Amino acid sequence: MRLMVLVSVVAVGWSGVCLGDASLELKIGYLWAKPVKIRVSLLDVPADNDGLAGAQLAIDDNTTTGQFLNQSFAVVDRELGADGDPAAAVKALADQGVGVIVASLDADRLLAVADAAKARGQFVLNAAATDERLREQDCRGNVIHVAPSRTMLADALAQYLAWKKWGKWLLVVGSHDKDRLFADALRLSATRFGAKIVAEREFKDTGGARRTDSGLVDVQRQMPSLTQGAPEHDVVVAADESEVFAGYLPYRTSEPRPVAGSAGLVPVTWNAAFDQWGAIQLQNRFGAKFHRAMSALDMQAWTAVRMVGEASVRAGTADTAALLAYVKGPDFSVAAFKGQKLTLRDWNLQLRQPILLFDGRNTVSVSPQEGYLHQYSTLDTLGTDRPSTKCKLN
């Protein structure tokens, strides 16, 4: 999973009045900060416009749809510095007449944006934060979650490992807080889908440089030592959202075992090689416009902006309260090249969506897996279901 310092797609509002044949412009701003560019592999360093490019492509798609109703769309690109105040950014956008915020922020800053937005009658679409608490005890009635939760990602992986009958896991966890949060989600998923965690190991991040010549030798020794002496297991599952060690696990474990989680077989919303259900045409259009591959963050930003465009066209309004009501209502859905329309869970405002299981080159599978049934939607086998939610929406 990529380590990002934030990106925020921000703000929606009408600029201008529709008179006769005059067009109506819907502005969608993008508030962002430069991403952290530290990765295990140089191939994984994000582009400077990671996320922003997806929003820009969605603007094109919104305009294609809206032109028949004399609607046009534009993205406003604005950088948020490391010390930037999210609440001040919300106010500045409100002063410009914008009403919807699509945010790609960490959990704390997302909540700051949401609370400031609520005071001004705005609502937020979360395009990046996977924290479970945002959908549970810290949920907000004005926040729509486009990004999947950690539990959705973990459940998608656990379903496939159960289908493979790889029921014995060696769980290796990083030493950072978000690594532990992903590990919590994996433990819950193991319980839900009948897996057994036979042992846990921790990889402590000491900040050493592993890209030097000696670093490669150290890694070749560290990974076997980390996994040595574990009870019999079918798969090594890594919780390493900080991207410190998991990328070094494949082919270096003490026993010859597959690796999954934060490396090896990884649950994601999107990958540049995904080509099912018409996705190839989206990939081609993105590549032609930006001359690079489309990332998961690009796709989540694209989906968020498309949700706004879809709501504005179908509801025939730019009123913020009306748009929110339509998105939260039973008639809303959005197509996102996932084989089915995506809809919203009314108990925590999480967008239902299939999760890809990717090995870095190819799509291995897509969850939910066949055989996992649900009385409403099989997509609700991924993540926190209605009976278990702690969310109390206002």
Image (cartoon, rainbow, N blue to C red):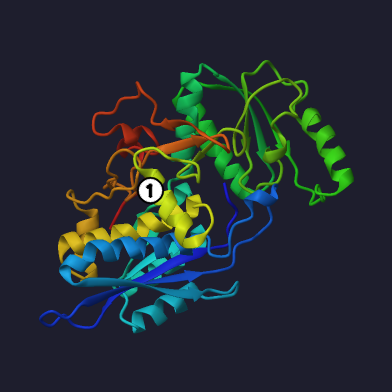
Q: Does residue 105 show up? A: no
Q: In this view, does 65 lie above or below 18?
A: above
Residue at 50% across / 44% down in the picture?
271
Residue at 46% across / 40% down in the picture?
274
Q: Foreground: 365 or 149? A: 365
In the picture of the structure, the residue carrying the numbered disc 1 is 281
Q: Foreground: 49 or 307? A: 49
State the image quarter where residue 261 is shown.
Answer: top right
Q: With 294 as the anchor, is 21 left or right in this view?
A: left
| Residue at the outermost right position | 214
Q: Does residue 20 show up? A: yes
State the image quarter where residue 317 is shown.
Answer: bottom left
Residue at 33% across / 35% down in the picture?
379
Q: Is residue 93 above or below residue 366?
A: below
Residue at 24% across / 54% down in the picture?
328
Q: Foreground: 312 or 65? A: 65
| Residue at the outermost left position | 20
State the image quarter where residue 319 is shown.
Answer: bottom left
Q: In this view, does 146 lie above or below 240?
A: below
Find residue 156 and report its horizontal and vertical position in percent: 45, 33
> Mark 1 falls on what kind of element?
helix
How many neighbours does mark 1 have within 10 angstroms: few (below 14), some (14-19), or many (20 or more)? few
Count up the numbered dots: 1
Find residue 385 and report its horizontal and vertical position in percent: 34, 37
The C terminus: image quadrant:
bottom left
Find residue 43 and report its horizontal and vertical position in percent: 65, 49
Find residue 291 and report its horizontal and vertical position in percent: 52, 59
- The disc labelled 1 sits on which kind of residue? Gln
Q: With 58 as the anchor, is 270 left or right in this view?
A: right
